[in-house]
Amino acid sequence: MAALAGACALTLLGGAVGAPAAQAGTVHTAAPAQAAAAAPGAAPAGKAAVPGASKPSTAFPVALSIDSVSPSYATSGSTEVTVSGTLYNSGKKAVHNAHLGVRTGSGGGQPLRLRSEIAAVFQRTGPVTADGLEIPGLGGALPDLAPGAKRPFKVTAKASQLGLGSRGVYELAVDVKGSTSTVSTLPATLGIARTYLPYYSQPADIKKTQIATVWPITAMPETVPQSLPNDSDSLTPVLRSDALATDLASGGRLNEVVAAGSSLSKVTWVVDGDVLDTADTMSKAYRVQHKGTEGKAAATDNTDPGTGSSQASAWLEALHTAAAGGDEVVSLPYGDPDLASIAHNGSGIAGLSTALKRATTAGDVTTDYRLGTDARTDVAWPYQGHIDPQVVATARTVGGTTLLVNGADMPESDSVTRTVNAARSIGKGIHAVVSDAPLSNLFSGDLSTRQARTLAMQRFLAETLTITLEQPNQQRSLLVMPPRNLSADAADTLAEAMAAATQGRWVSQATLGTVAKAPADPQADTKVPSTSRYPKAARATQLSHWALSRSMGTQGQLDLLMQILVSPDRVRDPFNAAILRSMSTAWRTDRTTGHSYREGVADYLQTLSSAVRLVDKSSTTLSGDSGMIQVSVENSLSQTVTNLEVRLTSASATRLTVYQPTPARLSILSELKKSVRFPAKASANGPVRMTAQLWTTGADPKPYGPPVTFDLEVTDVTSGVIWVIAGGLLLALLAGLRIYLQRKKRGKDDPEPDPDAPASPQDDPDRGSGAPQDPPGTVDDGGAPQQDASVDGADGPDQRARNEKVGP
């Protein structure tokens, strides 16, 4: 008994009750206040069911959480294992005569042989026969637990006393027995919690399982196309929020992802170049938009200074160091466009395929430059790894010949009793690397509590050891694929679990490339699931056809604006990147913010485009049968525009003829307005509806901006015609007199000329009449031709633009 007491100890904090003589162990006491402080991070017991534990209820009022198993696996019978956690009475009655017990399953010293048995333990709630009997000599008496009372516990025992026999994985359960009645003293199980304990004593005679882990460097897009001029005559970039500063800071999500991944010997970083660019932007001076100003030009009164410069610099350096250490790097298309959304909802949208290819190139160039690596571009990662034929085809368009696939999409049949390799061919030159779903799912949930992290850690070790022992002489190669938004807690847990399994010598760390080259198992599923099998939950969060159309509509408007700018790169690059970000996979988790981002990009581009416009024109009067009609063009941008022309048309060509110019380039300096004058000839009085439209010039001219319409009132055409007729008669008389005099003179000196000979140009009596001689549509640069008649309401020549300067 003394030896047993030395080998096993139970520590209970929160009450003073001695262990009965029949139980070997020691009991320590502490004040209740100390008990509460002794369990930091414990889950709020009684709030929700925990995997592998009884759900708090009237029948099971005591909620237990196992917060630590140390060490996480045993290597011999003498290994001392300590299990610690928390007890909580969620019921309305006190628990009397309570007792803590330990169980290791009903196998009689035999481990769990199959992964399905491990899953069954995870799914249990209340106590069942398969939990086995309480191990004598372990555990101990508990003080009464008042309603709402919470106390930590700790049990220490050698592996041999836990009944661990052959190597493998064992259930490890802790339960509480007692009574909630003051009348009956018969004990009943009032709560139970379960975890796993691997036992691996002879590691030299097996082939370790290779496991590749992907570490996503992705985030919700932050950079917007706006920028703010600064004192050094350069531009200060603008972000939509400063949330990334928190992620990059110590303890932040991306900071922990890099720190945790860097602690392993072999990892694969899956990188969105946009995150690297944003971090580099933040490492210098930057501004943050005020909410509600997404579509407006940036200014000091609608932005604030960013706060994450030091955090961004340190994080970028840490990732650069990690990548330079020989880790494998995969570059995602820039902005991480949602391949599945594009595959399912992008049909008929012009430009999407081109945008994806541009994103692939930009992602590769950015990642290589920022990290100093030669990143892989042949890997496609659709949302959560879900695929169907459409998704596979879209992935192929971006050069994805290696596809990261969710294991739930391609499960093995029930007849396959072993774990197969991740890599396999799925046809048309595409190789799928299929994740192990049970392992990957461990890191997709909420791991913010010690209880959740411990359970994920122990199950990972249990699953991987069981995989290795399925066929000890045949090496397996697996993929663990956590979610894109891998949390800080999940990253730490994954790294800790991989390190423990590696130290235990049943797992070896590998890169994605190594696992992808492993031979395919002949029993592996190679059939791409049909479109109807694409998960409904994933389909519900996709970017809609409208959202994708909005993004590509913005691309079309951008292409039009590029035709008229003399410095297009200042606008093209920020907007091209923003358009790719607007289709990001990250928006699935926040569709409202994604919509706001897309609308902000489109609205700001509209602000820039509309800064070059025709000036509104009121009703105008044309006095006489001809004159000049003036139309003004305003440029409120901060750079010169060119490759423009104005076209003016009349709604009644028979009453008013406008002489169109030969297409010529119209250039307008920043913040200036220019006027274009159109010669016109009227044949009748009255109003005529006129339409002016800006057009781009070149091989493929297009209308630019909205047209401007106005009424032209034609007056005094009759009197003008009379003067023309009178002038014509006078010219005819003068011409006749001249001919008479010439004939009279030639009658004396020369033979009579041929009456059918043509007149020379200088003798043409009609020269100077008819259409105006000056080229129509001349631009008023201070030397415009004299008008034939006045046109009321015309603007003057070059003037200062009245609108405030906008844009880069």
Image (cartoon, rainbow, N blue to C red):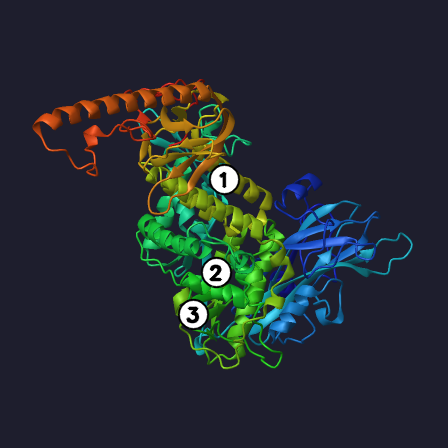
Q: Which residue is mark 1?
A: 602
Q: Is residue 804 visible?
A: yes
The nearer-to-camera label among 3 and 1 is: 1
- Looking at the image, which residue is at 24% across and 30% down? 764
Q: Residue furthest left?
A: 749
Q: Is residue 640 visible?
A: no
Whether residue 266 is situated above or below residue 680 in the rendered picture: below
> In the structure shown, which secondary structural element does the residue marked by tag 3 occupy?
helix
- Residue nearest the observer in this picture, 137 or 574: 574
Whether residue 650 is situated above or below residue 484 in the rendered picture: above
In the rendering, at what x and y percent does residue 768 appear? 28, 26
Which disc, if any, is residue 485? none
The nearer-to-camera label among 3 and 2 is: 2
Q: Which residue is mark 2?
A: 381
- Looking at the image, which residue is at 75% across and 65% down? 127
In the rendering, at what x and y percent does residue 7 appear? 61, 63
Q: Which residue is mark 3?
A: 515
